[in-house]
Amino acid sequence: MCTIVHISGRRLLERAEALAVHSELAGGLTRTSLSREYRGAADLVLEWMREAGMAARLDAIGNVLGRYEASTPGAPCLLLGSHLDTVRNAGKYDGMLGVLSGIECARALNAAGKRLPFALEVVGFCDEEGVRFGATLLGSRAVAGTFDPALLEAKDSAGVTLAQALREFGLDPARVGEAARKRAEVLAYAELHIEQGPVLEAEALAVGVVTAINGFTRMAVTLEGSAGHAGTVPMNLRRDALAAAAECALAVERIGSSEPGLVATVGRMEVLPGAINVVPGEARFTIDVRAPADAQRLRAVQSIRAGIAAICARRNVAARIEELQQQGVAACAPWLVEQMAAALQAEGLRDFRLPSGAGHDGQAIQAIAGIGMLFIRCEKGISHNPAEAITAADAEAGARVLLRFIEAFEPKR
Ligand code: GLV
Ligand code: MN
Ligand code: MN
């Protein structure tokens, strides 16, 4: 009946490698939601779930879902998981490790012939990163029942709407609502994820317990100046949209650096018409602002808006700022934090707690269940980068803590 001996860090890393083969980027990893490559990864995950003794399927938005049945069939579940989509030129573990660890725990229970009083469900969310359609947490919002149907009209860079992508994937956009789970079906949500920061490494720890996930605001900005001949328009008569955007990006950096905890990023910029001999007439860029306190983030967003307005007024450039998405701080449920800390100690590890600067699916799932997270050390804290690296020993330590947490799990009364 010993379950823990069945956990293998090496298998977790091998499976992360196997998933990384399903990539839109030759020689690197990019996998956006509902793509052909996403289907390839999903099929592999479905196969591993079934091999682990789970009933597995795709849900109505394309999340992969596996269920390891409870001792009493039909009982509510402890939901584990993370996402299967990636950023562009991504690492192999952001998201995937949480899905693989959940399957590893179900596999260990199955190998030991052990059933729990609750079901174990593992989900691989189809879109957490928001790379393809610009809006994040699509899969987890559908499960939480907070998916906004207006997003079905959101387009990817090729002009394909989310509704079309769902149809091409074999799903019916009118039925996305069927992915929603009821509160009574989900006892809690627990996600294992790489830290994506340097704190655990600095503490010489393999695993930590997350206390809260920072909130975010995402914006799209369009600046309109005037395109003109690069050889003939005098410098003092220009309305250069790129020069204005560059100054705005520096203002975003300055505001993001102005207070501890706050971060602000211009991650993408396009310049039109984009020719060597044309003064840029239009510039489009994105802004991502995060903070551990909502009031701090909202203040920063106000300063950024005012900064952009002042820069553009001075340069006689028109600015349009669209707020794409915002999400408040998501606190991990204290009762789950305590149970995870106890699991850490049961593994002989130090009880160490830290906040998450990165966003996670729990931000959406908190609408229907308490959320808890475990972080695993990653090398130099590097993530959203192909250099993302973890060790098999750390992956194994994390999955062992997760399994101990699962086996001792007490639902909130
Ligand atoms: C997801 O990784 C995010 O924090 O943007
Ligand atoms: Mn990510
Ligand atoms: Mn992630």
Image (cartoon, rainbow, N blue to C red):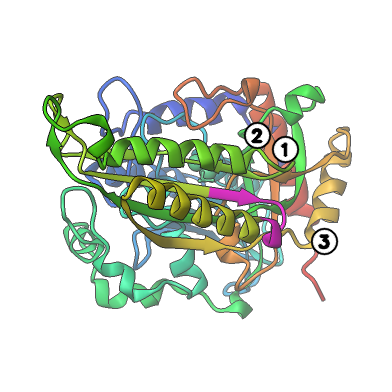
Q: Does residue 119 appear in this view?
A: yes
Q: Secondary structure at mark 1?
A: helix
Disc assigned to residue 7: 2
Q: Nearer the viewer, residue 12 or 216?
A: 216
Quarter of the rendering containing residue 86: top left
Q: Is residue 119 magenta?
A: no
Q: Give the mark nearest the N terminus, 2 or 1.
A: 2
Mark 3 or 2, closer to the camera: 3
Residues at circles 3 and 2 in contact by the CB criterion of under 8 Å: no
Q: Secondary structure at mark 2?
A: loop
Rendering coords of residue 145 (x, y %):
48, 75
Residue identified by numbered label 3: 334
Q: Residues within 10 Å of mark 1 (few under 14, many from 20)?
A: many
Q: Is residue 386 above or below residue 407?
A: above
Decide if ligand 3 comes within 8 Å of the CB at mark 1: no
Rendering coords of residue 390 (x, y %):
60, 23
Spatial separation of the CA atoms under disc 3 and disc 2: 27 Å
Q: Nearer the viewer, residue 24 or 52?
A: 24
Residue identified by numbered label 1: 400
Q: Amino acid at mark 3?
A: Pro
Question: At x 12% / y 25%, what residue is drawn?
Answer: 277
Q: Amino acid at mark 2?
A: Ile
Q: Which residues are magenta?
A: 289-296
Q: Amino acid at mark 1?
A: Arg
